[in-house]
Image (cartoon, helix red, strand yellow):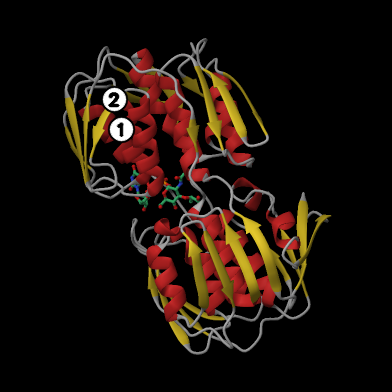
């Protein structure tokens, strides 16, 4: 297993290009199961999660390769509606194949995802949606076994706004008989892109991006090409690096319209940045960041996937901030690691009080999930001295070549073989 060694204090400047969105490419890959044929998915990020989803698709009979950020899939010979435990346990998003496999084959056997570093992550809303669409669902030895001759459109109210359940149900409903209405639907840009991809395939969908999505089932769909939207969480992570230790970081290839609230929080924190265009922002650190409170919420609220990174920034801010995690109440495995770096954080259930310190000190720390890893890298960039970040396989799930991109703008970050700890 590798680790990153980061020597802090190096100001960042220069251009960094944002990759395609992990959380957009994964549901699009699953949606390719809905219609046999060839798909070209451009701006696809080379990530562990992309490769895992490719393995999940291959297990169903799909052939595919990714090269130079172009993912070619051929789902013609897909004939095995099965997603095995050893793949689904690696990546919860594998569960996205349930809806498309059920819609195309009338049956599916998909492993329940395991939990993750910050606790159980249920799929009850996905299952509720499939049942409401008329599927018979049983749980058998850790697998969801779903059967449905023909799914039937209906009203589905998601008790919790769930990105995954919205995507899964939408993919199941596009080939159902009649109309499906999803109430309390997720509004994330990745869900909007999934809806538009499905519409390009021939699906009839409206309301994507609002809390109510209407789908009228059609007889069949056709394969199409797509350009994956930029990764708003990677973009926000690099913007925060610029806010913490940047002197003219140029973040390119992002979509500022997906970051409205985040950018307003940066302004509140006293960060000076210039929006050169919809896809380019120039950012530098202020004298000292101001402490700013956040509460995470479904889009367009503050993204839970930026909570850990924001906490790293607030660790060196002037004043105290309150971080309220309302999406995953226990998403705080990064807190003890930040404390090892000298952060002053008090945790009470899903509330973290961060008292800004003047300076963090480098130390050995452990990654626990994708975004916690990003938080530790940000902290390492500003900490005095050397920080060793172990178990970096987590970060490679969701950030394409992050060490190369950071080195290119002046960070001193090296990948090293890690002693096993
Ligand atoms: C997606 O996960 C993202 N992953 C996550 O990003 C992100 O944190 C999350 O949405 C919230 O924005 C992908 O898109 C691949 P949810 P998902 O269903 O779909 C509860 C990252 O770092 N819930 O919106 O799994 C759930 O427990 C990852 O890129 C149920 O109760 O999240 C949570 O509290 C981490 N029952 C809330 O809903 C269900 O059936 C939101 O979860 C489903 C979800």
**Is 101 situated above or below 402?**
above
State which quadrant residue 132 falls in.
top left
Q: Residue at x 62, y 51 (%)?
A: 399
Contact (Cβ within 8 Å) of mark 2 with mark 1: yes
What is the spatial separation of the Cα atoms under label 2 and label 1, in whole angstroms?
6 Å
In the shown orientation, is residue 23 left or right of residue 284?
left
Find residue 10 and report its horizontal and vertical position in percent.
75, 75
In the shown orientation, is residue 19 left or right of residue 352?
right
Viewer-proximal residue, 178 or 117? 178
Dot 1 beta carbon under 8 Å from ligand 1: no
Is label 1 in a helix, a strand or a loop? helix
Q: Residue at x 56, y 62 (%)?
A: 237
**Is 176 situated above or below 409?**
above
Which class describes the residues within 10 Å of circle 1: few (<14), some (14-19), or many (20+)? many
Which residue position holds label 1? 170
Please give the count of numbered marks on the rendered protein. Answer: 2
Which class describes the residues within 10 Å of circle 2: few (<14), some (14-19), or many (20+)? many
Find residue 299 and report its horizontal and vertical position in percent.
34, 56
Q: Residue at x 44, y 69 (%)?
A: 263
Q: Residue at x 51, y 50 (%)?
A: 231
Residue 364, visible in the rendered structure: yes
Is label 2 in a helix, a strand or a loop? loop
Which residue position holds label 2? 174
**Is 239 situated above or below 81?**
below
Viewer-proximal residue, 260 or 95? 260
Find residue 338 and report its horizontal and vertical position in percent.
61, 73
In the shown orientation, is residue 358 left or right of residue 209?
right
Q: Which image quarter is the C terminus in?
A: bottom right
């Amino acid at each position: 297993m590798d680790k990153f060694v980061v020597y802090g204090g190096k100001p960042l400047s220069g251009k960094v290009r944002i990759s395609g969105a992990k959380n957009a490419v994964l549901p699009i890959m699953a949606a390719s199961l809905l219609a046999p044929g060839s798909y070209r998915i451009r701006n696809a990020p080379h990530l562990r999660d992309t490769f895992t989803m490719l393995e999940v698709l291959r297990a169903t009979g799909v052939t595919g390769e990714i090269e130079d950020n172009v993912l070619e899939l051929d789902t013609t010979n897909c004939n095995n509606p099965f997603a095995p435990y050893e793949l689904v346990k690696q990546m919860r998003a594998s569960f996205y194949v349930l809806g498309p496999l059920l819609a195309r084959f009338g049956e599916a056997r998909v492993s329940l995802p395991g939990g993750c570093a910050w606790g159980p992550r249920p799929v009850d809303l996905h299952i509720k949606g499939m049942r409401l669409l008329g599927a018979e669902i049983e749980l058998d030895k850790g697998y969801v076994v779903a059967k449905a001759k023909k799914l039937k459109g209906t009203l589905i109210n998601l008790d919790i706004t769930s990105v995954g359940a919205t995507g899964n149900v939408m993919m199941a409903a596009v080939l159902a008989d009649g109309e499906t209405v999803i109430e309390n639907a997720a509004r994330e840009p990745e869900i909007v892109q999934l809806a538009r991809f499905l519409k390009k395939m021939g699906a009839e969908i409206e309301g994507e991006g609002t809390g109510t999505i209407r789908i009228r089932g059609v007889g069949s769909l056709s394969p199409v090409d797509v350009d994956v939207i930029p990764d708003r969480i990677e973009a926000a992570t690099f913007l925060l690096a610029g806010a913490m230790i940047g002197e003219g970081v140029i973040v390119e290839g992002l979509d500022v319209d997906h970051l409205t609230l985040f950018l307003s929080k940066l302004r509140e924190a006293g960060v000076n940045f210039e929006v050169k265009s919809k896809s380019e922002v120039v950012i530098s650190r202020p004298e000292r960041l101001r402490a700013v409170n956040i509460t995470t919420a479904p889009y367009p609220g503050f993204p839970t996937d930026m909570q850990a990174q924001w906490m790293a920034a607030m660790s060196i801010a002037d004043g105290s901030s309150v971080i309220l995690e309302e999406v995953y109440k226990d998403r705080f495995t990064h807190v003890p690691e930040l404390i090892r770096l000298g952060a002053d954080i008090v945790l009470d259930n899903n509330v973290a009080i961060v008292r800004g310190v003047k300076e963090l000190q480098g130390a050995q720390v452990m990654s626990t999930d994708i975004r916690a890893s990003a938080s530790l890298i940000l902290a390492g960039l500003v900490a005095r001295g050397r920080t060793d970040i172990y178990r970096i396989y987590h970060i490679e799930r969701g950030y394409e070549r992050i060490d190369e991109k950071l080195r290119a703008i002046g960070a001193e970050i090296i990948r090293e073989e890690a002693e096993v700890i």
